[in-house]
Amino acid sequence: MKVEFHLNGELVGAEVEPRTTLADCIRNDFQQTGTHLACEHGVCGACTVLVNGEAVRSCLLLAVQVQGDRVVTVEGLSGDELTPLQAAFRKHHALQCGFCTPGFITTAHALLSHEPEADEERIRDVLSGNLCRCSGYVPIVDAVLEARDAYRKSGDK
Amino acid sequence: MKPPVFEYASPATVAEAVRLLAARGGNAKVIAGGQSLMPMLNFRLAAPELLVDLKHLKDLGGIHIDDAGVRLGAKVRWCDIEADQRLQSAHPLLCEAIKSVAHYQIRNRGTVGGSLAHADPSAEMPGVAVTCEARMTIVGPAGTRSETADAFFTGPLQTSLEPDEILTEVALPPWPHARRWAFLEFARRKGDFAMAGVALYYDLDEAGQIANVHVGAIGIADRPVRLAEVEVALNGQRLDDRLIATAAKVARDSVDPPTDIHAPGAYRRALVATLLGRGLKKSAARGV
C-alpha cells in the first residue's frame, strides 16, 4: 500500500506492506535509524516518536495508520546546536550506552511541550514508560528537570 | 516479532466497517488505537486476514455527560479522559481507575472500546464497566443492540461480540455527588497489568448506613467480577473498622484466584482482602 506522511517536516511516501510497523518504515524505508527498536511489544519505550505532537510507540502503530499525519523522530528534535534536552542529558550523564535515549528524548520533549510546568512526580510518572538498562533513571530525571526551564521560557517550542 | 501478513482497510462509516468484517467471517479484526492488538500481532498470537481500522469513523470519540450518566465513544482515549475536567465530578472512579492504565505513550493511543473488546481479566476499564453496571452499545449487520457489561465479558480475552460486530459506546450510570468510592490495584511496576485490583462505591442512606454498594475486582478470575458476598456483608451496615475487617475476610474466603507466572493464587487472594480494606478506609475519608 502507498502511504504518505510528514517525516520531520518533509512530505515522504513509501510503498509498504500493511503489516509494516511505523518503526520499521522509518528505519528501513527512510533510513532514520535514530528510532530504536527493542521489545517490539510496547513495553520499553525506545521506539517512541511524535505523531501529530503526541508521544506514541512506533512499534504499536502501522505505517499505513499515519497516512497524512505529522511524524517527528529524534532526528527531528536536533539542530546545529545542542537542544536544551540534549545539553541537559550530556551535562547530567543521563545516558551510558545510549540505546534508550531517543525514546527518552522524544517522550520528554512531548511532555515538556504539553506540560512545561510538570513537576518531578509527573516527570517520573511519564518516564516510567521507558526502560533504561544502564540504570540511569536518576540522572535522566535530573536532566529533564533542568531542560524544563527552556520549555517554560520558549512556550510551545 | 513482526506481525503476520494481513490486508488493511480504513472505512468511512460504521456500516461499511461491519460489512467488511462480515465478508471475512471470523477472519477480520477491528483496530483502533491498537495498543492491545498490535502486541498480539507482533507476537503472532493473532493472525487475522484483514484489519479494519476505525480511524476515519466519526462520532466514536465523544465524551457525553448528562443526567443519564457518562457515555464514552469507543474511540475515546485514556488521554482524552485525563484531559476532560468534567469527568472528575461526573465519574471520579473512572478517572482514578484509568490512571493505572499502562504508560504515557500508550495512553495517547489506547482506547476505551479497545480495552473492553480485548477483555483482559486484569484490565481497569472492564473492571469499572462491570462494577458500575455499564451498558455496551454494539453495532452489527442486524443493527444496534445493547448489552450489560456483566453479559459482555464471557471469559479471558473473550466477549459476546460476534466477529462482525463493533463496540461503539459504553454508558456508565449517573454518579451522585455524595457517593463514596475507591479504586486500588497492585502491580509490581507502575503501568503493568494488576495482579489484583478492587473498585468499589456506595451511597449512604439517611441513617448513615451503606446502601447500593458495588464491589468489583480485576486480576483474580477469568474476567472482571463483582464480589456479591462482600456486597451482602456491607449493605445496610455502618462503616467502621470492624465492618472493614469482616468485609476483608469475606473477600478472602469468597474468591479463588488463579496461579500464574505473575503471582500465586493465595497471594492474589490476600491482595484482594488488603486492597478492599484499604479501599473502604479511603472511601470513608471521601465523605462530603
Image (cartoon, rainbow, N blue to C red):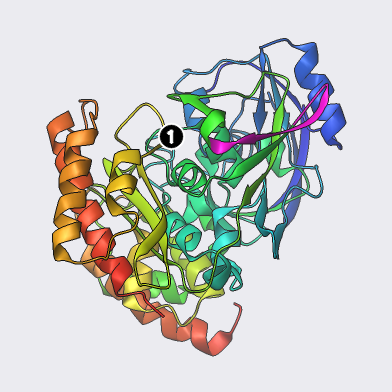
Pick the residue in front: A109 or B146. B146
**Label 1 belongs to which residue?**
A41
Magenta segment: B139-149
| Image quarter of the C terminus of chain A | bottom right
- Direction top: furthest residue: B25
**Residue A143 coordinates in the image, percent (x, y):** 32, 73
Neighbor class of circle 1 (other Cα within 10 Å; few <14, some 14-19, many 20+) is many
The kind of secondary structure element at disc 1 is loop
| Image quarter of the N terminus of chain A | top right
Q: Please determine whether, in this image, residue A138 is positioned above or below residue B62.
A: below
Instruction: Check the residue under mark 1 and report the chain it is in.
Output: A
Give the image quarter of residue A16: top right
**Residue A62 coordinates in the image, percent (x, y):** 63, 35
For badge 1, the amino acid type reads His
Q: Is residue B26 magenta?
A: no
The overriding secondary structure of the stretch rendered in magenta is strand
Q: Residue at x 43, y 51 (%)?
A: B101
Pick the residue in front: B166 or A40. B166
Q: Please determine whether, in this image, residue B85 is positioned above or below residue B265.
A: below
Q: Residue at x 52, y 73 (%)?
A: B177
Q: Please determine whether, in this image, residue B5 is positioned above or below residue B187.
A: above
User: Does any portion of residue A99 appear in the rendered image?
Assistant: no
Give the image quarter of residue B53: top right
Pick the residue in front: A75 or B192. B192
User: Does any portion of residue B210 appear in the rendered image?
Assistant: yes
**Residue B238 coordinates in the image, percent (x, y):** 27, 65
| Number of numbered callouts drawn | 1
Horizontal side of A117 relative to B199 (left or right) equals right
Q: Residue at x 75, y 20 (%)?
A: B21
Q: Please determine whether, in this image, residue A137 is positioned above or below residue B26.
A: below
